[in-house]
Image (cartoon, rainbow, N blue to C red):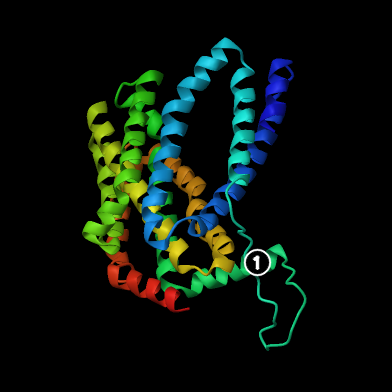
Amino acid sequence: LIGLLGLLVAMDKVHLVILYVAAFLLGTAETLFDNASQALMPSLVDRSALETANGRLYAAEIVTNQFIGPPLGGFLFAAAAATPFLLDAGSFIGAAILVALIPGTFRVVQPRTETDGSPTEAVRHRIRTDIAEGLRWLWGHRLLRSIAMALGVTNLLNAAGMGVMVLLAQDELGLGSAGYGVLLTAGAIGSVAGGLVASRISVRWGPGPTLIGCLVMMGLQDLGIALASSAWLAGTALVLGGVSAVTWNVLTVSLRQSIIPDRLLGRVNSAYRFLGWGAIPVGALVGGVLANAFGLRAPFFVSAVGNVVLAALLVGAVNTRSIEDARAQATAN
């Protein structure tokens, strides 16, 4: 897809509709890849090493996506518009080869008996049945249900602020396009740090307090941005938010990988991610409404309060004891 897009760019045949279609198809493929890669991880590393492995993966992804990729793409685009697309096409082919070379068989063995014990043919799944099964399992697990709902709420709140961040940077902090890019880099720095230290923080504080602390830190990030009188203060807040967001992701992804049954991991993950990520566009819309009615800093104040309240409400369901019990039950099964 990227290679075809590169050829169209080289021939000066790209239209806006083509970009829309390409973006949709790439988004679909990325969703499938991300879900499959998370389901694959428990087959590659020991359960005790999941947090470390996921942390390193997040750190590598952020470095390449947010530090190396954008300036490289800009340089190549300036040289020849089709070059970054064609190079990207080659990188996807290389990545596919690397994945194909991973040794092992990762197809999940499905049960071959009905619930009443009678034999059946190899199970044929309908996508609606799979989605429903994933949703039922997730909703029936109190710990993961609570975390999924919390992710949806905090993503909605944070998207409300980030949806108007560019306007705040321009109108309130006096930044141009270059300054705004540097400001976002602060968040990326925090994200890399979070990926590298998440497992150590979890060991030191325990997974429950770490997750609750991440929500509080997200609230402090939004409060810092809401009160910021300079780009330096806003950048410091974004570093804090980057650390907390990636730490949350590393711990919760690793938790799902350790307690969801292998045959359900993909479909439960997809249900979880739909609940968590589906709230982002809604949050962006809410942020626009709040900013229009009460000013550009209003979404950040609302997000700050919401994240702290969410952390307080979540303490009873998400704590180290409930996490350890869930892991023990998964191991027993």
Residue 29, how many percent across, how many down? 63, 44
Residue 255, how many percent across, how many down? 41, 62
Q: Secondary structure at mark 1?
A: helix
Give the camera-side residue of 79 and 313: 79
Give the camera-side residue of 175 and 194: 194
Which residue is located at x 56 percent, y 58 percent? Answer: 270
**To which residue does mark 1 refer?**
130
Which residue is located at x 48 percent, y 47 percent? Answer: 280
Quadrant that contains the N terminus: top right
Left or right: where 153 falls relative to 219:
right
Residue 271, how many percent across, how many down? 55, 61
Graded by Cα atoms within 10 Å as few (under 14), some (14 to 19) or many (20 or more), the crowding at tag 1 reads: some
Which residue is located at x 44 percent, y 65 percent? Answer: 258
Residue 86, relative to residue 147: is it above or below?
above
Res. 230 in view:
no
**Residue 121 lies in what quarter of the image?**
bottom right
Left or right: where 128 falls relative to 224:
right
Which residue is located at x 33 percent, y 28 percent? Answer: 183
Give the camera-side residue of 230 and 14: 14
Res. 37 in view:
yes
Residue 249, relative to residue 108: is it above or below?
above
Give the camera-side residue of 132 and 326: 326
Identify residue type, mark 1: Asp
